[in-house]
Amino acid sequence: MGRFNFDLIITLSLFLSLCLFPHTILAQLKQDYYAKTCPNVEKIVRTQVEKKFRQTFVTVPATIRLFFHDCFVQGCDASVIIQSDGNNKAEKDHPDNLSLAGDGFDTVVKAKQAVEQVCKNTVSCADILALATRDVIALSGGPSYSVELGRLDGLSSTASSVSGKLPQPTFNLNQLNSLFGANGLDQTDMIALSAGHTVGFSHCSKFANRIYNFSPQNPVDPTLNKTYATELQQMCPKNVDPRIAINMDPNTPKTFDNMYFKNLQQGKGLFTSDQVLYTDGRSKPAVDRWASSPADFQRAFITAITKLGRVNVKTGSDGNIRRDCSAFN
């Protein structure tokens, strides 16, 4: 009877773990996954990323954002790179993904082509995206870190799967924590990953409500720095060309650093979902800590982006190695 109870407890514990923490039951990702099959993969990818970086700095925010948008929808499986065709509207054509810059896609496609020349049908597009993300962060002054590898590419990509899966510029802290929590990421991870906006850019429409029609009593969001609000109105007049985009970090837009948190302290978070990290007392201590300690921020960021890269990884029959990142085999 005792043995039966013990086995039952173990079985129930495993069941609850799967139910409550589905994203922590991982494939066997390893930093040296390609050590025998494609030992130079990281060097090959880095060479291509550096080449693209020299062509345009947009490579940096575009690749980081592509990785994030990929992992939050069906997991880190490069499904966001798939092109739509006559039979399927893919993830990249959902409204929330239409602003993904083409340079991010091009970075992965070019790196994949170079890898294929040396290691045919061996390295997944999902892993190449993870490596390229690390490389653009390091190239722009951020931390370099070891990347876990071994993901397969997803077998599905639909625009309908994107709805409700990505954070919106208007989100409050509860909404952010809920969405990140659904992907196995806690509040600390969420705040650290939000700092990707330190090299980001945004179209005016994403924050126009904060500078023109925030509320009947306050047309301008009162949590927004007044001088910064005036600058934003000058860069984004009411009838601005919808293609116009501005830097999310007004101070060091081309450096991956902790300036994001210093900006929040000054009321210079561009989105509501940025500034709320400082105005909400639950997240403010982390903002203050990382604003004063770049090293602490970098450690937290590495932890968070490593966890992000583990979200819903595909293995076995759930995925494959795509020959062309933009099309299923």
Image (cartoon, grey):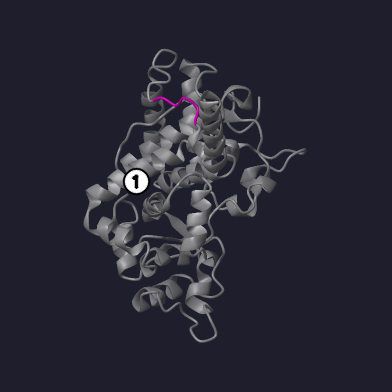
Q: Quadrant of residue 305?
A: top left
The quadrant of the image that shows the C terminus is top right
What's under tag 1, amino acid-wise?
A: Phe
Where is residue 308? Give x, y as percent.
45, 41
At 32% from the left edge and 40% from the top edge, which residue is drawn? 139
- Percent position (x, y) of residue 180? 49, 50
Identified at 62% across, 36% down, the residue is: 82
Predominant SS of the magenta segment:
loop
Residue at x 37% of width, y 61% of height: 283
The picture quadrant where one finds residue 11 is: top right
Instruction: Say if 223 sits above or below 32 in the image.
Output: below
Tell me where the magenta segment starts and ends, as one range. 26-30
Position above or below: 200 against 145: below
Residue sitting nearer the eye, 170 or 51: 170
Q: Report the residue that reaches farthest toward the front.
A: 1
Can residue 54 be seen here? The reply is no
Q: Name the one closer to the observer, 27 or 148.
A: 27
Q: Is residue 26 left or right of residue 279?
A: right
Label 1's element?
helix
Q: Mark 1 — residue?
A: 301
Lateral position of residue 204 relative to residue 163, left or right: left
Please state, as top left, top right, bottom left or bottom right, where the N terminus lies in the image.
top right
Q: In terms of depth relative to the viewer, which is nearer, 43 or 4? A: 4
Question: Residue 95's x, y, as percent?
Answer: 63, 54
Residue 136 shown left or right of residue 15 in the figure: left
Is 166 in front, or is 136?
Answer: 166
Look at the image and say whether residue 73 sits in the magenta stretch: no
Q: From this viewpoint, is residue 216 visible? A: yes
